[in-house]
Amino acid sequence: MASTRIKKNDTVKVIAGKDKGKTGKVVKIDRTAGRVVVQGVNMVKKAMKKRSQQDKGGIIEIEAPLHISNVAIVTKDGSTSRIGYKFEDGKKVRFAKKTGEVL
């Protein structure tokens, strides 16, 4: 999967899986695997090793990646939509297909 219509810092809503219905901001996108990391969603516990004297080891909670097909962009009115492209004033812009608003 080379390209995706979802970008970093977009607000997305999870539409499938254990965290269905939760919204958050996209933190990271892995284009080769087709996965996104969403802030505060799909939290998993991970055992971390102590790296230094000040660093605390132990079990921490981090966000795990979700498949990109399981998230949808959220528009300003709070509804989810698919993303399209169009040209405005000679520039290519993304827009929400449901509402027509430019993202």
Image (tube, rainbow, N blue to C red):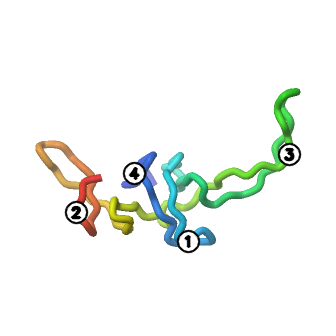
CA distance separating discs 1 and 2:
25 Å
CB-based contact (under 8 Å), mark 3 and mark 1 = no
- Residue with the mark numbered 4: 3
* Vertical arrangement, residue 53 with respect to residue 13, above or below: above
Q: Earlier in the sequence, mark 3 or mark 1?
A: 1
Q: How many marks?
A: 4
- At a point 77% along the width and 49% down the height, the residue shown is 60
Task: Give, as a three-letter code, the residue at label 1.
Answer: Lys
Q: Quadrant of residue 65?
A: bottom right
Q: Earlier in the sequence, mark 2 or mark 3?
A: 3
Task: Give, as a three-letter code, the residue at label 4.
Answer: Ser
Please tell me the numbered disc located at residue 97: none
CA distance separating discs 3 and 1:
29 Å
- At a point 51% along the width and 66% down the height, the residue shown is 14
Decide if residue 82 is on the left or right side of residue 41: left
- Residue with the mark numbered 2: 100
Q: Secondary structure at mark 3?
A: strand
Task: Give, as a three-letter code, the residue at label 2.
Answer: Gly
CB-based contact (under 8 Å), mark 1 and mark 2 = no
- At a point 25% along the width and 54% down the height, the residue shown is 102
Please tell me the numbered disc located at residue 58: 3
Q: Secondary structure at mark 1?
A: loop
Q: Quadrant of residue 49?
A: top right
- At a point 55% along the width and 71% down the height, the residue shown is 20
Q: Earlier in the sequence, mark 1 or mark 2?
A: 1
Q: Dot 3: few (<14), some (14–19), or many (≥20) neighbours within 10 Å?
A: few
